Image (tube, grey):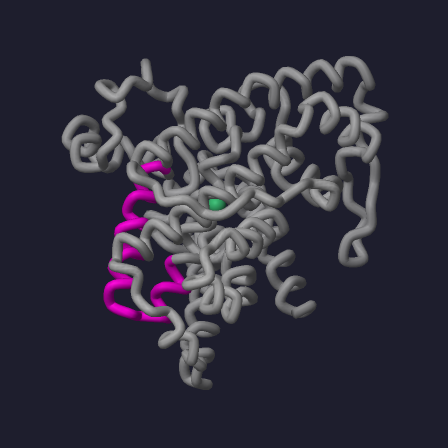
């Protein structure tokens, strides 16, 4: 467990270093989305929103769903086509009405072409695709796929609820606020989420999942103004010296946003991070539940006996290792 976490941290540092040495991938944020901590919490807590017919199976595999909540970020730099699934630059479009920005993937690709869409991010469309895939996995009674896609879908939904995932200015780089991405989605939840109320009530059926996915990115985007404005105001007020501090991490001294600055900013946001985390948890539960209903409510207790063989575990470990290898390969050829 510790070793695994350590290797992930090393990977992140490598990614960050490589990012700065590369212009070809200049759109990609330098920090993993929502931070690994928040992604894991969101997938884990979503399990408790499910009805009893689903809860047994999901609880049995809750550690898998937690640990693999960050797979999409792990493979983000290694797998072609992965990166655009995590964001959408709503401000890249002249307006965002359904006419200009079609809500269905088919119409949107006819309008813009898949490449242009990929450039500005595709998270709300990708949630719809993952929703379809999870429903199919339930229909096929395929326990492994159910878990894999549930974990992935949870990740994309959580990303869709992050304000900085809905803008070209994703890391404050266009407004002199470099670093705000990791600050909002990693540092704040790590410092303060212990006090959040994560009881969201039971999962509900989504009669229009497509609309739900779009509403999430629009709601997140509506919160963007305060995310940026309050950070700027507080920086002006406290000054750079009080904004930053140093902490020990993995034996290294790293520069971080100070606890004082974080606390003041968090207070000004008046529960925004908590609201977005809660919205993510509820939405993940709602999507998992809706896929299961749409698949005809298969009996998951019959699947609960799934036990991974050594071969399964090795195949999964190999796949993760290959993301890492491809990462180095891709980058060394840049
Ligand atoms: Zn992500």
- Residue 17 visible, this angle: no
Q: Main secondary structure of the magenta part?
A: helix
Report x, y in % for residue 275: 59, 33
**Looking at the image, is 190 positioned above or below residue 320?**
above
Query: What residue do we see at 77% from left, 45% from top?
Result: 254
* Count of marks placed on residues: 0
Location of residue 188 in the rendering, given as x and y in whole percent from the top left corner: 69, 37
Residue 267 visible: yes
As rendered, which of 51 and 19 lies closer to the eye? 51
Q: Position of residue 302 (x, y in %)?
A: 36, 76
* Residue at position x 42%, y 69% in the image: 319
The residue segment tinted magenta is: 124-149
Q: Residue furthest bottom?
A: 310
- 10 horizontally vs 170: left or right: right
Residue 248: % across, % down: 82, 50
215 is higher (above) or lower (below) than 99: below
* Residue 127 on the magenta segment: yes
């Amino acid at each position: 467990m510790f070793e695994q976490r350590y290797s992930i941290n090393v990977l992140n540092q490598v990614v960050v270093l490589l990012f700065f040495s590369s212009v070809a991938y200049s759109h990609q944020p330098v920090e993993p989305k929502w931070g690994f901590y928040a992604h894991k919490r969101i997938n884990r807590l979503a399990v408790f929103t499910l009805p009893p017919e689903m809860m047994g199976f999901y609880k049995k595999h809750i550690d898998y769903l937690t640990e693999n909540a960050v797979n999409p970020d792990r493979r983000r730099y290694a797998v072609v086509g992965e990166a655009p699934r995590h964001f959408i630059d709503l401000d890249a479009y002249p307006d965002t009405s359904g006419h200009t920005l079609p809500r269905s993937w088919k119409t949107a690709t006819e309008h813009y072409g898949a490449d242009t869409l990929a450039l500005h991010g595709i998270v709300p469309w990708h949630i719809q695709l993952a929703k379809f895939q999870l429903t199919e996995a339930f229909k096929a009674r395929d326990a492994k796929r159910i878990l894999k896609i549930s974990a992935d879908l949870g990740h994309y939904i959580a990303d869709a609820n992050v304000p900085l995932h809905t803008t070209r200015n994703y890391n404050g780089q266009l407004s002199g606020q470099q670093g705000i991405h990791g600050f909002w989605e990693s540092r704040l939840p790590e410092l303060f989420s212990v006090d959040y109320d994560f009881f969201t009530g039971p999962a509900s059926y989504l009669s229009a999942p497509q609309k739900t996915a779009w509403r999430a990115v629009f709601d997140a985007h509506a919160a963007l103004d305060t995310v940026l404005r309050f950070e700027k105001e507080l920086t002006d007020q406290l000054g750079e010296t009080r904004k930053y501090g140093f902490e020990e991490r993995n034996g290294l001294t790293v520069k971080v946003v100070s606890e004082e600055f974080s606390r003041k900013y968090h207070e000004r946001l008046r529960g925004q991070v908590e609201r977005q985390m809660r919205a993510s948890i509820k939405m993940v539960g709602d999507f998992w539940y809706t896929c299961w209903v749409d698949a005809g409510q298969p009996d998951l207790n019959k699947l609960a006996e799934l036990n991974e063989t050594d071969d399964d575990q090795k195949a999964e470990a190999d796949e993760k290792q290959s993301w890492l290898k491809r990462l180095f390969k891709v980058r060394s050829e840049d």
